[in-house]
Image (cartoon, rainbow, N blue to C red):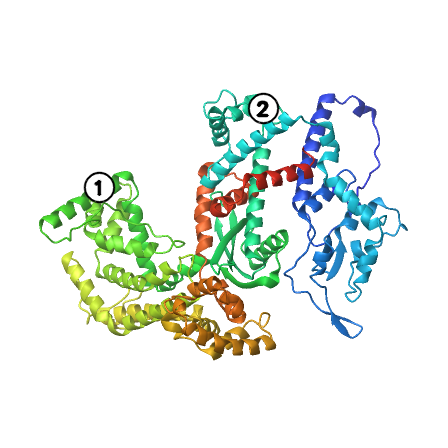
Amino acid sequence: MERYFKRRFASTTSSSDNVGSSSSRDVDISRDVDSSKESELQDILANLIADPGLRPQMLDYDPNIRDEVRRAYLQKGPCQPKDHTFPQTDLSGYDRRFNVKWFDEFDWLEYSISKDAAFYLYCYLFKSNFRIGQGCSDAFTEMGFRNWKKKDKIRQHVGPVGSVHNQSRQYCVDLMNQKQHIRTVLIKQSEQARIDYRICLTASLDCVRFLLRQGLPFRGHDESDTSSNKGNYLELLQFLADHDEKVKAVVLENAPGNLKLIAPTIQKDLVNACVTETIKKIIKDMDGAFFSLLVDESRDVSVKEQMAVVFRYVDKSGDVIERFVGIQHVSDTTSNSLKEAIDTLFAREELSISMLRGQGYDGASNMKALVAVAKGNADIATFFTSCNSLVNIVGASCKRRDILRDQLQKDVTEALEKDTFPTGRGLNQETCLKRPDDTRWNSHYGTLLSIISMFKSVVKVLKFIIEDGSTDNLGEANRSLREIQSFEFVFHLFFMRSILGATNDLSQALQRKDQDIENAMTLVKVCKDQLQHMRENAFEALLDQVSSFCAKHDILVPNMDDAYVAQWRSHRRAPIITHLHHYHVDIFIQIIEWQLAELNRRFSEVNTELLLCLTCLSPDDSFIAFDKQKLLRFAEFYPQDFNSRDLLALEDQLEIYITHMRTMTDFSQLKGIGSLARKMVEKGLHRTYNYVYLLLRLALTLPVATASVERAFSAMNIVKGPLRNRMGDQWLSDSLLVYIEKDVFACIDNETIMLRFQNMKTRRGQL
């Protein structure tokens, strides 16, 4: 990429041996160099630095690409971080700082967060066109302006009509004026040609819209004219042409040779235009509000680590919104790598880190934590290994699956004839063993339920595999049969079913996209209470249930008073304990205490205090949970939003607010702080009680679970499947964003996207 910055010329010598080199080789080398230059130029334009204090100077770029860089910066617009908290500087004994209102007064004024200084985009782009001494200062282009008390210096820099600043401004206008651009002048088109081009572009964009919304691939294996299947994009375009004569007249074989709009690069540019406008609409919907960041990582089908990012915020209507904003390939999942990727995203979208109010990471590990904790016990870890092996053996082939289905059908029919099975709509349907997955909620619980309900059929299938005599999985089937027909396996099966059943409601509720912290805290408390009750009262009932199941399936039940020795311990040195002690103390009590400790660890004292303060905002039962002191304590957690003066105002406002709320019938039946926020906006009370509404927004912005990020990975498996495993990272991110946020994308009209596309091509000098 150095070829596009200051060049280093090396002395060259000619040799008579080189004179006779073939012209064909020169052409090939030239073609490769041109292709490499174009690729590197696109990298430069795609990674322009937004912060004016960190940019290289325009003279550092090669003269051949300076206009391309200038167009890119003009298209990007000035760097104006309006949501940034500008630091104060001591100037002559007074604390002063940059005034955000200056952005409105001086439209192309820029601000550098890194240098805390102001710059002018016009002068930065075209300062190199003027000689030293022509009034072109470095204050607004290199060093930056920081004398905040002398605003007149900015006006003086603008100067009269013929000043360097105004000349630079005119250069920018001329550069972006397509009608004056030399390429446009050379390819002046007739009115009919422009109409035809617009029809062709609209048809191409309609194809892109359809394929993106469905998550379908664009390209085909064979796109030649003789191919019977040219890929989704070309086939869909042909379909539109066959059903619209106007489209047919201007696309594919009827289009001019250089305006077919079917090249892969054109398709990617159209998609990128769709993505740019979609993100722009999301950022606009945020309207400068603070937000939370939800991040998670997962491997795609090509075994590349991808980091997905979701923003959570409260919109103007008081609704909690979670929006997927992109996926980023990371070489590893260390904190530094994730931070760099997040910083790149914030810089690209010109978002201020000062508006960040919460962060949530790795929802999959959070949800599998309770299972992972239980696996800390060797017996439970062995049990889950046996379950995985059992599912693999029974489901290893289509033949065995069919045998299991047939056997299950026979068992159900036999039970129905004996009137021992309940009947009704939706009962006794065909099913199979569910496979557990550590990164999928509820999967382990579902596996245990399916083993219990199909136990008799599973035993018969394992016996069939053994009696069949095939060497394939014979040993594993024999081992699994012995394991599952033991009291130990059955006890672990029913015990872990009870544990996961107690935590299942919490796990399922946290998958909801609109879950708020108030509800989450309630569910956590219920889960803890249920586990504690189980620890104190449920062992005997569990033992009876296990013994009854074993008697039904002819499984030997040991005497609980007999000595128990683990298989991996020495019988001579092992401590003497009974079966009752082992199953009650070493398994039952220990695992439950680990579960409670894990829940207490994830909801620490500080976190719990914060979250309990939030519950005081709840409108349930006519605001019965309201506590002014706890709400003031909650506000103290956010000194950036509530200074000492704001806290005093909040204290006074809370008294009036709660009296008003309890007298209004519209608020008496509300459930949850989410409904309270929406109702306040609906009634216009978010402006009356602005500090209370700020508390609501902070509470709703905090992330509860990263379910939205997990859904992004589910979508990634659709967009980047085995047949599309060579998708580039940018192409994957663009396709995924529009596929996930299709409701936002649907609100963007073709005119806006086509304008963005035209500006992109103009910036690159391709139109």
Q: Position of residue 557 (x, y in %)?
A: 17, 63
Left of 427 or right of it: where is 609? Answer: right
Q: Is residue 3 visible?
A: no
Mark 1: amino acid: Ile
In this view, the residue in front, 752 or 303, is 752
Percent from the top left, x then y, of residue 360? Answer: 50, 61
Mark 2 Cα shell of 10 Å, populated few (<14), some (14-19), many (≥20): some
Q: Split into 4 quadrants, where in the image is the C terminus?
A: top right
Measured as percent of width and height from the top left, residue 432 is found at 26, 47
Based on the displayed image, in which of its 4 quarters is residue 536 positioned? bottom left
16 is higher (above) or lower (below) than 216: above
Q: How many marks?
A: 2
Instruction: Say above or below: 326 vs 180.
Output: below
State the mark number for residue 255: 2
The amino acid type of the residue labelled 2 equals Ala
- Residue 40: percent from the left, percent from the top? 68, 40
- The residue under label 1 is 403
User: Circle 1 — which element?
Assistant: helix
The answer for how far apart the CA atoms under marks 2 and 1 are is 59 Å
Mark 2 element type: loop
Q: Would residue 410 be visible to someone looking at this image? A: yes
Please determine whether, in this image, residue 29 is positioned above or below residue 668.
Answer: above
Specify the farthest residue to the left: 418
Front: mark 2 or 1:
2
Residue sitting at 51 percent across and 45 percent down?
747
